[in-house]
Amino acid sequence: MRRGVIFGHRDFEHILKAMKEKEDFAVMSGIKPTGEFHLGTLMTAREVIYFQQQGATAFYGIADVEAYEDNNISLEEGERIAVGNVADLLALGFDPKSGYIYRQSREERVKDLAIAFGRGVTLATMKAIYGDRHMGLYLSALIQAGDILLPQLEEFGGPKPTVVPVGVDQDPHLRLTRDIAFKFRGRYSFILPSSTYHKLIKGLDGSTKMSKRDPMSYFTLEEDPEVIGKKISDAFTGGRPTAEEQRRLGANPDICPIYDLYLFHFFEEDEDVIKLYNEECRGGRILCGECKNRLIKIVADFVKDHQRKRRRYIDKARDILETE
Ligand code: SF4
């Protein structure tokens, strides 16, 4: 939030009040088990863990129904991928003692909520939000609304402020769920869920969003650090055509995915980000090769450490998901 990466919200006041007055509140997010953790899922996971550390009960849903409906990934394949995803989450610091990790396909309460919510949404609304898609996609949208409102059921302590940290492209889901929460408030006494919105990190090719269709535009936390290093080396930058020009005129961090990586994830201190933006990059004090090499080292240290921790959590992840 300080860096403007998380830049928007709906009803975040409820969460701030709960944090300040030490009242019950929840954070809810999850992952579609379609592949390894990448920088987008890392962002959401870090936000969930942050709110958990601020006192929230943390809910993390494995969206295996959505992965089946939207990406044609079987529930069995989704389960295999989810084990790794949960190990990632635990390695990043998620505390299962004050959290609840579940699979949509196994969580009856979420499915029951989706069935109840079906009465409150018309086909026209679904088409307006998601386009003309198959019924299963609309069903998974109702299940996702069930995920978001699950923390407010009596079994989890009843209605409470719940924050859902998402990328800005996810706002339509939030609006649908807030409409549903409003319609069903008589039956469940729901508080409308809050949300925070983060910017989307640029693709390594300079595109406005990483694309899973192009493996050179992103990297996962499971990749070999050397391969990641090569991808960073080959990445687009906001640099000038020659070293002389860059020293004289400075470069452009606003279009540079390398800058985004420092800003979103890999510089701990705000002062380092400010120095990179103003002095080093725009001031022409650093060349892009040097800037990339520094990042490659930071990312390699992080990824090696993360992969070591993640291996230790695989069995725990299997226990949590009750799988072999
Ligand atoms: S100096 Fe760094 S941040 Fe600036 S354009 Fe080059 S790679 Fe990007």
Image (cartoon, rainbow, N blue to C red):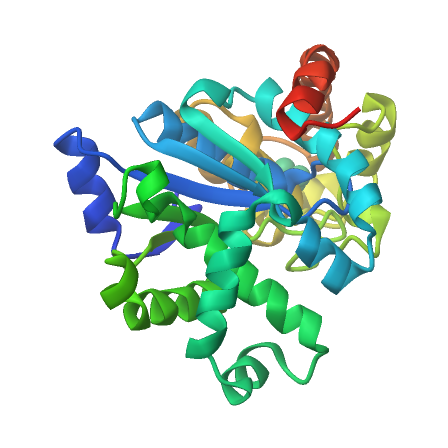
Q: How many marks?
A: 0
Residue at the spot 63% in from the left edge and 44% down from the top edge: 106
Look at 23% across and 58% down and name the residue there.
Answer: 189
Q: Position of residue 126 (x, y in %)?
A: 55, 80
Where ligand 1 lies, by image quadrant? top right
Which is more toward the observer, 61 or 204?
61
Front-lying residue, 107 or 254: 107
Task: State the image quarter where residue 101 is shown.
Answer: top right
Figure quadrant of residue 26: top left
Q: Is residue 263 visible?
A: yes
Q: Residue at the spot x=43%, y=23% of the render?
A: 269
Q: The N terminus appears in which quarter of the rendering? A: top left
User: Viewer-proximal residue, 110 or 286?
Assistant: 110
Q: Is residue 1 left or right of residue 141?
A: left
Q: Give left or right: position of 175 versus 216.
A: left
Quadrant location of the C terminus? top right
Q: Quick check: 158 left or right of 129?
A: left
Residue 11 spot, x, y in % from top left: 25, 56
Picture coordinates of residue 128 (x, y %)?
Answer: 54, 85
Q: Is residue 232 above or below residue 237?
A: above
| Residue 167 seen in this snapshot | no
Q: Is residue 308 above or below residue 13?
A: above
Q: Is residue 84 left or right of residue 264?
A: right
Residue 181 % position (x, y): 33, 64
Give the residue displayed 80% in from the left and 35% down from the top.
80
117 or 125, which lies in front?
Answer: 117
Q: Which residue is most to the bottom?
A: 124
